[in-house]
Image (tube, helix red, strand yellow):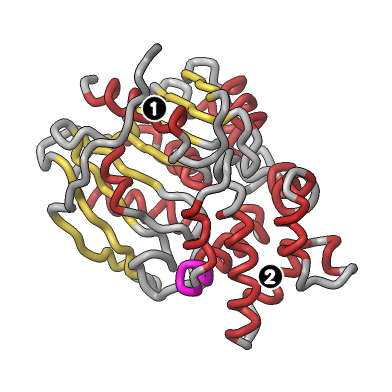
């Protein structure tokens, strides 16, 4: 039986700073690994999630020069939890500015969940600057995907957890949960914002893994939850600021020449495996791995195994 791959040992960033977007945001970034190594950019999930030290460990530090950054409004980027000038296309341009800052022509693009959405949007806008792609937990931001997770779908697998989400909503508000939460998360009352943010955030924290995980509690911490819920709901309210429901799938033709690995858990309740299947059908050159016995999170052993194999393989190309 093949031994499952794990993360590389912990390591520190060798450089960090803030990129001024010149429209009200300062983007925190850091570099780790080999300063002369193969360039890669890690795109975190959410929207509004932020980077974590273990994300550096997804790449062989001997072979990769990895840029990690906190997207607008979250993590160490400033201003915190801001929705101003915060759209998919602002983030795409931030990534391109970071590439220019680092001074590389092409880099590997790695993204999971919302990170896969943003990775696809960036690659389709700047295919000439993408060498390879590693994508996990595919999310293309179609209405059917939002409805599954925030209206009627995942709720049927987690009725006890979903009950908490809708507990603060009236019967009328429950007909459009995203819109109802939008009202609360943009309220002038910070306490109203925080109550909604905790419930919104914990719903995701408690459903990202196949089996319950103790790490879900961190999703309910005020500081993380406020940015995570406000920014995520902001993007979903505006359907990701995409031109059409199928934009990311329709424009796969722009990136079909880019070597890619797609990894998705069979029992992913956040983003259904159908999403990965649909992407792979549009992109037959991509390598699809449907991981049995796995949910959504990078922490799922089978998912992590395939992600590590992918970054290792691309390191030597």
In this picture, is 290 found above or below 88?
above
Q: For numbered disc 2, what is the local secondary structure?
A: helix
Residue that sits furthest to the left in the current view:
36
Q: Which mark is residue 210?
A: none
Q: Which residue is mark 2?
A: 182
**C-alpha distance separating marks 1 and 2:** 37 Å
Q: Residue at x 39, y 53 (%)?
A: 93
In this view of the protein, which residue sits in the foreground, 176 or 299?
299
In this picture, is 80 found above or below 14?
below
User: Where residue 103 sits in the image (x, y, percent)?
Assistant: 18, 46
In the rendered image, which quarter is residue 36 located in?
top left
User: Where residue 216 sits in the image (x, y, percent)?
Assistant: 52, 56
Q: Residue at x 46, y 31 (%)?
A: 303
In this view of the protein, which residue sits in the foreground, 175 or 122?
175
**How would you classify the magenta stretch by its main secondary structure?**
helix
Q: Which residues are magenta?
A: 222-227
Q: Please check the rendered image and state whether residue 283 is part of the magenta-colored stretch, yes or no.
A: no
Viewport quadrant of the C terminus:
top left
Q: Please check the rendered image and state whether residue 226 is part of the magenta-colored stretch, yes or no.
A: yes
Left or right of 40? Residue 236 is right
Q: Which residue is mark 1?
A: 305
In this view of the protein, which residue sits in the foreground, 138 or 19?
138
Q: Residue at x 70, y 48 (%)?
A: 149
In this picture, is 75 found above or below 291?
below
User: Where residue 139 sits in the image (x, y, percent)?
Assistant: 58, 41
User: Where residue 20 sits in the image (x, y, percent)?
Assistant: 29, 68
Left or right of 9? Residue 218 is right
């Amino acid at each position: 039986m093949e031994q499952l791959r794990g993360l590389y040992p912990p390591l520190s960033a060798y450089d960090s700073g803030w990129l001024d977007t010149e429209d009200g945001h300062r983007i925190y970034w850091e570099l780790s690994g080999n300063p002369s190594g193969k360039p890669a950019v890690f795109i975190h999930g959410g929207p509004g999630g932020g980077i974590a030290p273990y994300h550096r460990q997804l790449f062989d530090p001997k072979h990769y020069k990895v840029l990690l950054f906190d997207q607008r409004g979250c993590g160490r980027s400033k201003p915190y939890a801001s929705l101003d000038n915060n759209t998919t296309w602002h983030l795409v341009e931030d990534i391109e500015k970071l590439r220019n800052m680092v001074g590389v022509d092409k880099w590997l693009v790695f993204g999971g969940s919302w990170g896969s959405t943003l990775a696809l949007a960036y690659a389709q806008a700047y295919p000439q600057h993408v060498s390879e792609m590693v994508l996990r937990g595919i999310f293309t931001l179609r209405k059917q995907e939002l409805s599954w997770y925030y209206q009627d779908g995942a709720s049927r697998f987690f009725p006890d957890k979903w009950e908490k989400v809708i507990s603060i909503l009236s019967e009328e508000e429950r007909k459009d949960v995203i819109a109802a939460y939008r009202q609360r998360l943009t309220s002038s009352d910070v306490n109203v914002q925080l109550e909604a943010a905790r419930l919104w955030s914990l719903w995701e924290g408690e459903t990202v893994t196949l089996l319950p995980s103790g790490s879900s509690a961190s999703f309910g911490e005020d500081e993380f939850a406020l940015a995570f819920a406000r920014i995520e709901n902001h993007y979903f309210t505006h359907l990701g600021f995409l031109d059409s429901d199928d934009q990311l799938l329709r424009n796969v033709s722009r990136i079909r020449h880019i070597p890619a690995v797609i990894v998705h858990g069979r029992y992913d309740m956040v983003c259904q495996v159908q999403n990965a299947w649909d992407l792979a059908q549009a992109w037959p050159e991509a390598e699809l791995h449907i991981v049995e016995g796995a949910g959504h999170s990078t922490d799922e052993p089978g998912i992590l195994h395939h992600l590590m194999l992918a970054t290792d393989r691309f390191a030597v190309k």
